[in-house]
Structure formats: structure tokens, C-alpha cells
Image (cartoon, grey):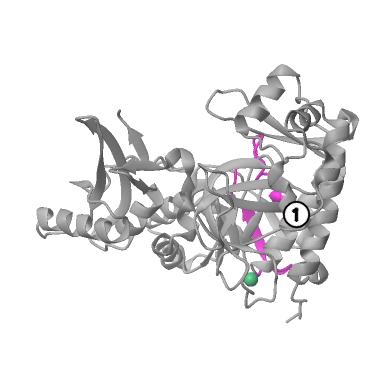
Amino acid sequence: MTEYRKYWDEEIETMSRGKLKEYQLSLLKNMMELTYNKSPYYRQAFDEKGIKPQDLQGLEDLKKFPTVNKKVLRDRQQAVPDFGDMICAPESDFVFLSASSGSTGVPTASPFTSQDFDDFQDFQARLFWSSGMRPTDRYCHALNFTLFVGGPDVIGAMKLGALTIWAGTIPSERLLAIFKTWKPTVTWTTPSYAWFLGESAKENGINPADLSIRKIFVAGEPGGSIPETKQAIEALWNADVYDYYGLSDIFGACAGQCEYKQGLHWAEDHILVEVVDPDTGEEVPEGERGEMILTSLKKVARPLIRFRTGDIVSYTTEPCACGRTHMRLNGIHGRLDDMLIIKGVNVFPSDIETVVRQNDKLTGEYLCVVTEERHMAVLTVEVEKNKDFQGDVDALAKEIQTDCQKLVGIRPRISIREAGSLPRETHKAKRVVDKR
Ligand SMILES: [Zn+2]
């Protein structure tokens, strides 16, 4: 067997935290100059705050700069077609754009220059390498290609040297046929699709654990960092699940798990991460939950300065057993948009998922339904009992309530349904229905 090197880019990946911060600061200073000088939007936003690029002397000065969010990106694109006035390179330098659809139906473009795109793919190769993918692997790319920033990640796998199979999002029977014919060892989907695909294989008389898949990369939903969900997918496929995090406005994957699978390593040489209290904007201590704000350090087509993601995360800078020094997300706990406030308690669907998936009397599917009674939000969790469950349904409901009380701090109503009765989404599962 070929002995491969341990890291894709040892110098960057194992740089001391002190050096990494110095490197980030030099990149950030350049980024502030670039955005102030090239983007009318950023210049005006900085001027309104009375701040100049040279006011950034240390990384701690970043918090003085204004934030942007998805709405700003969308509004600027509409105000200054076709790409908005946050771009910092001429269109002649653009070679690729991805787009996020968003709820308004107007796709927002995320353009890349040739250098941006090369950086993107080099980083995808680095992440794949850190998750143990090697040139001897066969990688079946099962993510959407249409305008989606995760599509071109398959090029990162090519760059790494793996044999790539460009499947995309095709019907599950066809994907399973590809799995059987060319025996890929690695694939990438959402957690709910990995679950769905494994279950459909079983329905068709195929045991997914007997197929060749040994690594599954997942992104797009919190499931990959919920131990109960991850273990269930791993058992189904007899494969290791690696959680990834991507953002259409930056890279297909911005962070991912190394082979130790203890959190998701960031690309801190490409992206600077802040975690803040969403209400006060103050930085939260390491290990505590807060909203993630991202600043791109190298991308020039449309740089992002302090982009509020709306994602609730926590992180650690403790050294990882793999030797990589870049910070790790403990997990993506949910989206600020999905956060429910029930009797004053912040509840994420991912917390409910943990309770549901650890209970072997249930199928693992669930739906959070929110209604209003006497001006109070009421949460009902709909779950499915397993086909072979013969016990007392009321006792089961009580058991789930008690588990919720322990883990989430609330006692939701529980509605127990027959196996297979909840809607199944193939790619991105909808977990909340708000009827208020
Ligand atoms: Zn690691």
C-alpha cells in the first residue's frame, strides 16, 4: 500500500495559533483596504460608522466594523445589478458563480475569480484529505449541481486524486445502481438523505452496510453533529460519517471533521470566525453558544466582512489529536430562524432530534408543530412509533416528555403516529411547522 503524507498542507494546517493570528491579521488588513477602495457599499458602510481600514490594528478591532447579512447581499444586488456593489474585482476576472435561492425567490449571486475558485478547490481537497480520503478512493458526488456552491466540490476531490463520479441529485434507485456498479467508497449528501437512501435500499432488498461506501460526508442540516443521528447513519451504512459546514456565500465546505471527528476544523487561513451573542453582539466565551459571524480573508470577487450567518454554534481552540491547530466547531446547533422560544426557553429542532433519535421505540422521524393558546406558544412534537412497537402509547409519550425535560428543559406535547406517516423530504428535511 502506498504511504501517503499525513497533511494536505502541513505548514498551514499545523501553524501555531499565535502565527495563525498574525497571518489572519495581515490578510484582514489587506481585505479592509480592498473593500474600502473597491466597493462603494463597504466604503459607505465604514464611513457611516466613522471607521477606516487603518483603524484595524489588531484582530480585536474587527468588532468595530459593521456587519452585513443575507438581506444586505440581496438588496445590494437588486440596487446595483447584476452582482451588487460589494464586488471588488472586475467581471472580466469572474469565472464562476453560485447562487442561493432564499425565500424571496430571487437568487443571490456569489461570484468567484479564477484565484478564488482555485483557493476554494484547494481547500476542499485539504478537507477531504483531513477526513481520510486518498487517491485510492472513489468519490461519488451526490450533491446538487444546479447553481449550488457544493456542486464544484467534486473538483476538490479530483484535485486530491480520487476517482470522481459526478452523480448529482438523481433518483435514489439510480444512485444505488451507481453504488452497486462502480463501488464508490466515499459519498456526500445531507444527513436526512443518507438516512432516506439507506432506508430505500433496505426496502429494495439491499443492505446498505454491504455496499462499498465507507465514508459519508454530510452537510446542510445539524444531524451530522448530533451523535444519535450520526450513529444511526453509521450503523445503517457501516460507514464513518463526517460532518461538514458550508455557506453558499463563501465555500461549498468552510469547515469539516478530521479523522478524529471531534468537531469541525475551520479554514482559519481563509475565513475568520467570530461567535457572538445575537442580541448584544458581544463575543461569547469559547464553548458557549452564539451566532457565527464570518469574514472572508482571501476571496476578492465579493468579499464578506462580518457576515451574520444566523447559525448558532459553539467552538473550541483546544489542540486536536490530529495535530491541526485550526479552531473547531463543536457543532451547528441550529439556525436562529429555526429557534423556537417555548415558555422562555430557547429550543432548537436539533435538541428535539437528539431525544427522538436516542429512543429505539421510535423511527427517528419527527416534526415540531407550534401553535398558540392563550397567547402562549405551544410545542407539539409529532413522532412515529416503530412498526413492531406493541407497548403502551401513553407511557411512551410520557417517556419522551421526561427526556425532553431533562435535555431541553421543556415538556412538549407528544403526538405518536404510525411508522411512515410523517412526510419524508429527500434532501433537506423540514422540521418545524409554525401554525401561529
Ligand atoms: Zn483534528
- The C terminus - image quarter: top left
Residue 75 position in % (x across, y down): 66, 23
Q: Is residue 172 magenta?
A: no
Q: In which quarter of the view is residue 36 placed?
A: top right
Q: What residue is at 52 percent from the left and 43 percent from the top?
A: 278
- Residue that lies at the very extreme toward the front in this rendered image: 50
* Magenta residues, start to end: 132-156
Residue 434 position in % (x across, y down): 33, 32
* Ligand 1 closer than 8 Å to label 1 CB: no
Q: Is residue 347 visible?
A: yes
Q: Is residue 417 visible?
A: no
**Which residue type does callout 1 highlight?**
Leu
Main SS type for the magenta part?
Answer: loop
Q: What residue is at 29 percent from the left and 38 percent from the top?
A: 369
Question: Badge 1 local density, few (<14 within 10 Å), some, or many (20+)?
Answer: some
Q: In which quarter of the view is residue 306 placed?
A: top right
Instruction: Name the residue tied to disc 1.
Output: 59
Task: Please state the quadrant of the image where ligand 1 appears.
Answer: bottom right
Q: What residue is at 74 percent from the left and 67 percent from the top?
A: 135
Secondary structure under the numbered disc 1 in the rendered image: helix
Left or right position of 233 against 110:
left
Q: What residue is at 82 percent from the left and 52 percent from the top?
A: 57
Left or right position of 147 against 57:
left
